[in-house]
Amino acid sequence: MSAPTPPIEPVEIRSGTELPAIREDIELHTSDGLTLVGELALPESGDPVATLVTLHPLPTAGGFMDSHVLRKASARLPALADVAVLRFNFRGVSSPRGTSGGSFGDGVEERHDLDAALDLVRERGLPHPWLLGWSFGTEVALKWGRTQPVEGAILLSPPLRRTSQEELAAWAGSGKRLVAVVPELDDFLRPPEAAARFAVVPETEFVAVEGGRHLWVGEAQTYRVLSEIVARVNPAALPLPTSY
């Protein structure tokens, strides 16, 4: 009789860890005639309990669908939190997945990109969609996401440079949840000023992250950000495992 197979020891989750998921290259088609490239990651078994539509940082500063927090959300959260994660390149942006059509729209023309992403969410019947914006992506979320069929928006390092105070104030009483995750040491908008700006939306869930920086570099900051996301979209999955 052969010896029993020893149990597989859990492996620590590191920066480059990609956990099991169903990953599909997708295309989005905008109302102004562009094709955008992206990826949809789904839990390997069972239906997702929520959906993240990710909106990446500033393309002219190197932001794309693989910007690390969004890539790690896609790599981990389908397995750890039963969450679907949609990533895509805004118009004119390239990544290893490919290049989206068009050219940078300074947060204005990207409204069509957001529409196309949510069209796919609706077509696939993906549940409880949330917008997950990072830096420039928060501007797109705030400018164009309030009237979309989403649960709310989670904003990582919001600079509030392209979003007017009137656009921000319009979220008050909208019934959509607004979560602002602001790093203590942000390069553009730090917690005291951010709290004053977001005061026009009294229901904002405001999270000031001690020691946090705009780019959320390092596993500790990544873990904190992913935990704040999961706390909103599937709190039953907390605390997130650090090994798998």
Image: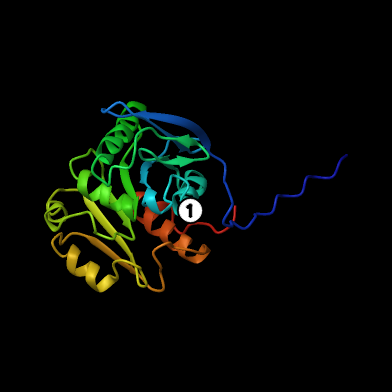
Quick one: label 1, few (<14), some, or many (20+) residues within 10 Å? some
The reply, left or right, for residue 194 in relation to residue 20 is left
* Identity of the residue drawn at 26% across and 35% down: 112
Nearest the camera: 7 or 217?
217
Q: Quadrant of the N terminus?
A: top right
Q: So how many labels did they put on this image?
A: 1
How is colour applied across the structure in the image? Answer: rainbow
The reply, left or right, for residue 26 in relation to residue 31 is right
Quarter-of-image position of residue 47: top left
Nearest the camera: 11 or 53?
53
Nearest the camera: 188 or 201?
188
* Identity of the residue drawn at 35% across and 72% down: 184
- The picture places residue 238, in percent across and down from the top left corner, at 44, 57
- The picture places residue 66, in percent across and down from the top left corner, at 48, 47
Q: Is residue 54 visible?
A: yes
Nearest the camera: 134 or 120?
134
- The picture places residue 125, in percent across and down from the top left corner, at 34, 29
| Residue 125 sits above or below residue 56 on the image | above
Which residue is the site of mark 1?
Answer: 68
Q: Is residue 152 visible?
A: no
What amino acid type should be assigned to the residue bearing mark 1? His
Quarter-of-image position of residue 207: bottom left
